Amino acid sequence: MVSSHAVAETVAHATVRRLIALALRHGGSVALWRLPNATAPVLLLSLRPLHLSGLPPSLEPSAQAGFAFYPFQDSDTAEALLLPADAVLDLSAGQQLTLSHGLPAEAAAAVQRVLHDTTAPEELPWHVSPQPFPHTTDREAYEALVARGVAAIRAGEVTKVVSSRAARRPLPTGFDALGAFDALCRQHPRAFVSLVSAPQAGTWLGATPEILVEIDGAEFRTMALAGTQPITEEMTAQTAVWRQKDIEEQALVARYIVNCFKQLRLRDYDETGPRTVAAGNLLHLRTDFRVDLKRNRFPTLGTDMLRLLHPTSAVGGMPREAALSFLQRHEGYDRTYYSGFLGPVNLPTPGISRLFVNLRCMQLRPTEAILYAGTGLTAESDPSREWQETELKLRTVGSVLD
Ligand SMILES: C=C(O[C@@H]1C=C(C(=O)O)C=C[C@H]1O)C(=O)O
């Protein structure tokens, strides 16, 4: 016998598939996401051409509602995207569908038809990035990159730099992106899990632990997340002991955030931590920052902080420009959307935006996935440990390819 819960899930699944098929077949874009600790995902369809602003999105309540998908650095190969919220289906209990007022009548009617359709949806035509496969870095080359980073730090060229690499893995036969999304939701209840497909970007799946900027009417939030070690029987979130290298690396990220507040002359913020948090098979050090927006009248704080923070020293380095220039010269591949940011803007209502750093993610191609991971380097970094750390980070999303 099938329980009523299972029936509801199957119905939702078929509806989600049909709606995604509708958007993809018409050259539209989709974003499916599950917020940390939420029970159900949200599906957004963009049925009109995408808005390319070049700038990080504005988070003011009057700005356009949509799903931001922003690269590490805006470029010709990775454009800053805001997927307009033409149709939004909240898959929690009520399964509420919201259609944008601006949506042409035929498109709105097509969405309604799909909702009441009962035919089984066939295979989904996910978008494939027009970019060639990135160069992948093997162990020897990655360790050489780390050694170069350490030398640059010791020479005083940078204080911290976050090196990264891409890796290719075959998709298992019968791989289903929606099934993989569900598996990530189950495995990572505290992560921001997402599946995004757009003609310009291709298709991306991830489960990130890192908030970049969250804003709702009452509060602004961000975090400094850095320092990594595997969870073992002896080393859990409760018992973790951290090396000086990790403590310093995370403190730099926290200091970077405090500096952004300083630039905006904001002094009234709460800082909690650092404390140890678990993310998949890993432990990190995290400091949470909150600003009470009732006490501080600062209507542009979300937008201003987003523009100052990205890319943070958790994914680029410090000082920012010197670290980015090092990566440009030595990393040897184009990160595109890895270590960019993503998330809903002015959704479900104006004034609520939740953006996350695009980590623990992969790009899906027809028969292969491209996985990405990086590690923050300091003067004490050991190349072979940093390689191991990227291997562990790749496993977060890599588990759905096993
Ligand atoms: C760069 C990544 O992660 C970032 C780097 C970390 C580190 O260097 O310890 C930890 C968390 C993230 O801020 C990644 O997951 O690819």
Image (spheres, rainbow, N blue to C red):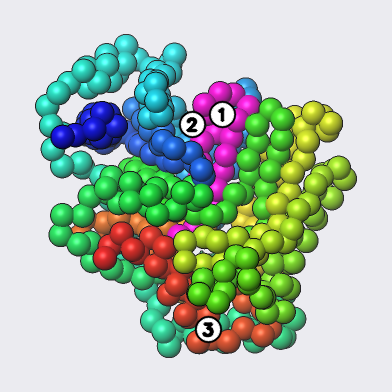
Magenta residue span: 341-360
Q: Are marks 1 and 2 in contact (CB under 8 Å)?
A: yes
Return the residue nearer the eye: 61 or 279.
Answer: 279
Q: Are marks 2 and 3 in contact (CB under 8 Å)?
A: no
Q: Position of residue 188 (x, y in %)?
A: 44, 53
Return the residue nearer the eye: 52 or 143.
Answer: 143
Query: Visible in this render: residue 341?
Result: no
Label located before the other in sequence (1 or 2): 2
Label located before the other in sequence (1 or 3): 1
Q: Residues within 10 Å of mark 1 (few under 14, many from 20)?
A: many
Residue drawn at (12%, 27%), measured in percent from left and top?
A: 119
Looking at the rendering, in which quadrant would you find the N terminus? top left
The amino acid sitting under disc 2 is: Gly
- Return the residue at label 3: 385
- Numbered disc 1: secondary structure: loop
Residue drawn at (21%, 54%), measured in percent from left and top?
A: 175
- Return the residue at label 2: 66
* Disc nearest the viewer among 1 and 3: 3
- Quadrant of res 165: bottom left
On screen, residue 130 versus residue 37, left or right, reads left
- Distance between the Cα atoms at labels 1 and 3? 41 Å
- Return the residue at label 1: 346
Q: Is residue 209 above or below residue 169?
A: above
Query: Visible in this render: residue 290?
Result: yes
Label located before the other in sequence (2 or 3): 2
Q: Position of residue 266 (x, y in %)?
A: 85, 43
Image quarter for ligand 1: bottom right
